Image: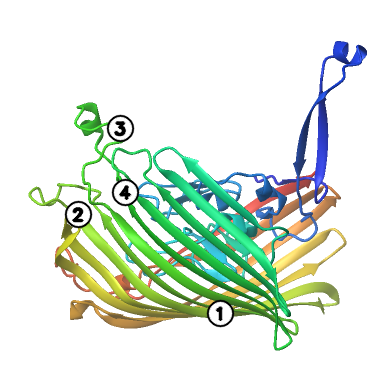
Amino acid sequence: MAIRINLPAVCSSIVFSLGTQTALSQGADEIEEVVVWGRSLQLLGTSDSASQGVAGYSDFSTRPMSRVAELVEVVPGMIATQHSGPGKANQYFLRGINLDHGSDFSTYFDGMPVNFRTHAHAQGYMDLNFIIPEIIERVEFQKGPYFADTGDFSLAGSNSMKTYDALEESFTEITFGLEDEMRLVTANSYQLEEGTLLAAFEHHQSNGHFDLDQDVRKYNGLLKYTGTLANIPSRITFSAYDSQWISTNQVPQRAVDSGQISRFGFIDPDLGGESHRVSLTGNFEINSWDLNLYASSYYMSLINNPTYFLNNPADGDQFEQEDERRLFGGSLRKSSESEIFGLPATQTVGIDVRYDDVNELNLFNTISQRRVSSIREDEAEEFSTGVFAESQISLTDKLRATVGVRVDFYSFEVDALRAANSGSDQDSLWQPNMGLAYRANQNLEFYLNYGHGFHSNDVRAAVNTIDPVTLATLLRRRMCWSRAREVRLAFATTH
């Protein structure tokens, strides 16, 4: 059972006066006031599910954010944790589901997918560190596999982050703290002849509270143009990110209990990583169609050692994961009003195209960050396209039905260090979704939803015939999917 409570107005305030009756009767000069205010978008009557919502605008204006992952924690039931350094993607949880680093929860940044397929560290790797939180205007979220417009990595839910087109006023914030903590963020909007240019910059450095200094050095930059190009309403966003850090990994409890290290101590001093991402996205309104295009270049090197001396008592189990890729893609969508069997309906159709060109997909054994042997040195190309259609039909004044279907096609090729682990394949799947929404009254709506969701798996697993560590023979299999279906009854209310 899910409950969504909406405030009744876009911006409302309630003033509570605090004071004793005695003070009032004595005509006190001042009465202390506490102002409680909030924002709400009225979604009853339009939502397909009780698991949809929007956060942003005034929600963010007075909310301090100490880390970028708090942008997804505005989704009710969402938790983002960190266990291996501040530059690594978070560990995510939603409604009791362990999402690892993003395998079943997708994020879109101005229309560009953030999750990576066939990543050197984790499938669906969702690193949000390239986002400047203060530039996010709103976060639209939906939970559950009930929506045809989201595909890969959206089984448990998804969210779409939109940046500001322009700022009401420029700002510069400087934060200082203990352990050499310093963060600078500045942004401004500039009026151009045909539109507006938004510029923002962020720098963050910190040594953290662990015994081993984290030595975080992060830089973020963003430029966004909003206006017209060739008489086409356009939004073009360029972002650049660079970061390096040292991490304190999980430590043995027995080492803490024995006094060998403190609670914030470390075993391996050489863990950490570096990462950078440069992205360009464009959103264009062409007649009644919404066109989104994106391109991104990405690199990550991550030094890790979760088992320390378990497998190699002499030199330790340290290893490096390296990922370098280029990402290209886009989407095309259209919503229109029509009639189905004489009933008013809103129809949405769309297509998504994505191409991942991964030229470094490596795993090395390391000693003190020095590569000593290679476990995997692979390359991969992965192409996908998804087509969807969804209709929301008004059966009566109070009852709406939603019916949709999505079809995804994937093809890939792997060029592995060991030729026996190379190969190519293709696969497809389709997912239906349907729902009913009953408006009991102006403040109460009931929902019944059914849907399918999935996440793709690392394509190397589909063609491997030799285990790269043990060299044991593996059974080759077709590209595999992790799928789930869900039925949910819920209601939403506003008061």
Q: What numbered label is drawn on residue 318?
A: 2
Asked if labels 1 and 4 touch by Cβ distance under 8 angstroms, the answer is: no
Residue under the point 66% across and 46% down: 2
Q: Is residue 454 left or right of residue 448?
A: left
Precedes in sequence: disc 3 or disc 4: 4
Task: Work out whether residue 309 or residue 11 is closer to the camera in this orientation and state it.
Answer: 11
On the image, numbered disc 3 is attached to which residue? 263
Q: Amino acid at mark 4?
A: Ser
From mark 1 to mark 3, how far is it between C-alphas?
A: 47 Å
Element under disc 4: loop
Of the numbered discs 4 and 2, the one sitting upstream in the chain is 4
* Mark found first going from the N terminus, 1 or 3: 3
Residue that badge 4 annotates: 247
Of tags 1 and 3, the one toward the viewer is 3
At numbered mark 2, what does the secondary structure look like: helix, strand or loop? loop
Whether residue 72 is visible to the viewer of this picture, yes or no, is no
Mark 2–mark 3 Cα distance, whole angstroms, equals 21 Å
Compared to residue 426, the image places residue 186 above or below, namely above
The mark that comes first in sequence, 1 or 2, is: 2
Q: Are marks 2 and 3 in contact (CB under 8 Å)?
A: no
Name the residue type under label 1.
Gly
Q: Nearer the viewer, mark 4 or mark 2?
A: 4
State the CA–CA distance, disc 4 to disc 2.
Answer: 13 Å
Instruction: Please say if the residues under marks 3 and 4 sit with CB atoms less than 8 Å apart.
Output: no
Mark 1 Cα-neighbour bin, 10 Å: few <14, some 14–19, many ≥20? many
Q: Which residue is mark 1?
A: 330
Q: Under tag 1, what secondary structure?
A: strand
